[in-house]
Amino acid sequence: MRGMLDQLRASLTWFTQQQREDYAMLVACDDGDVPLVLSALGGFDQADPERMYLTFAHEARTPRGYVDVMVELLRMRVEVIDAARAERGDPSFPPVPARGLDGELPASERIQALLAWWRSGQPDPTQVVVVAFVPTAIPSAEVYAEVVLPLLLGDATERWVRHMRLLVRDRRGEPILGPTVVERNAGNVLSTTVDFSPAACEQGLAADASNTDLDDNARGIALLHMAAMDFAQRRYAEAIRKYGQLVELFQRLGDRACVALCLVGCGDVLRQVERYDDARTRYAQGVRVATEVDAKPVVLNGLIGLAQASAAEEEWAAAETAWDGAARVAGAMRMELPIADFVEQVGVARLHQDDVKGAWVVWERVLEYLEEDERSDPYRAREVSVLERMSALAQKQGWAALGQQSQRRLAMARHRLQAEGGA
């Protein structure tokens, strides 16, 4: 995975900052890959003062609408530039040209006019401007091709192209632009493929884990991701084996937070294969180590797993203790919603221990907590869940008055949840 990211950055760096012969590059990727491409470009914009980066990630739903959004984005950037120029006493940016605003013109012609205008407003006319058309989604292949394909098929010597680098997204699985570019033998257009699909990531992680040029920590992190992918793909034996290797590795490296993370991960796998007693052991070990190094997120996940494994074995006292601990850690982390979730489960564990009064009391506390700030949608769902439990308990115990009260409160909570769009 690290090698894949390095390869992506190296490819984009070479095109935008090093080579001078080609003005356009097709970047074939799926929607899920786009954030990584945008992240790489954002890093260049911050670290490469010699070039200017204009990135457009909006969708092309209509040709005119796409360019109209471009105009507004460029105007917003011009406002910032003009404010800085005014402080220095420099002349302001020239107005947007009429051809860039003319909605009757083809979108590609408007874009060319806008890019030529942008170039004219720069103090250094030879500064390279990298223009990236990287929409997060491509709802219409036809509209997208109409907007950007003419930019790739034009004459590389045209005035608007000078000192420009175009990065243009294409689809990886069903390319929109690539076949036409090849068929038309468009010169000065390169192409690269970005593939961060699960299968590709797994291969990349395996390469990182076996790459002796990386340090032990980097290789361990790659193996940790592989263990998580094994778990997701239900390769449980492989996941357990990897987590065992990682515990030994991170212990040797002195990274106790990662030791705790791996112990909790191993507990997750063991719980999935219903080895609950072994899972509880690993969770407890992970929680202890994570507590010692104050790794609260790992402590929280470990306590949740410990509570669930204990409940699966009907060890309700242990489950209650773990849920209570999870609520306290969530409070320390200022995670308001999970507190109610965990305290509700404290009541469930008490009820299984025949502590009827204790269950009722703690559920009342949940309701009081939820009413404090009049929380909405997901909290209403928790309110309904708790009141359903209280109503059922009152009916089972023959508590007529409390049962009627709970039913009224439940009806009101359900109404509020429905009114707020909850399920």
Image: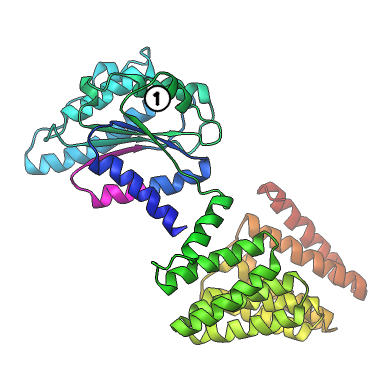
Horizontal side of residue 52 vs 146, given as left or right: left
Q: Which residue is mark 1?
A: 148
Residue 367 visible in the shown view: no
* Front position in the image: 404 or 51: 51
- Residue in view at x 54 percent, y 55 percent: 203
Is residue 6 shown above or below 282? above
Extent of the magenta region? 40-55
Is residue 258 shown above or below 183? below
Element type where label 1 sits in the image: helix
- Residue in view at x 46 percent, y 44 percent: 194
Location of residue 380 in the rendering, given as x and y in whole percent from the top left corner: 68, 58
- Residue in view at x 83 percent, y 62 percent: 407
Location of residue 178 in the rendering, given as x and y in whole percent from the top left corner: 45, 28
Specify the quadrant of the image occupied by residue 18.
Answer: top left
State yes or no: residue 85 in magenta.
no
Location of residue 317 in the rendering, given as x and y in whole percent from the top left corner: 76, 86
Colour basis = rainbow
Is residue 155 shown above or below 60? above
**Residue reaching furthest to the left:** 89
Specify the quadrant of the image occupied by residue 313.
Answer: bottom right
Residue 349 visible in the shown view: yes
State yes or no: residue 49 in magenta.
yes
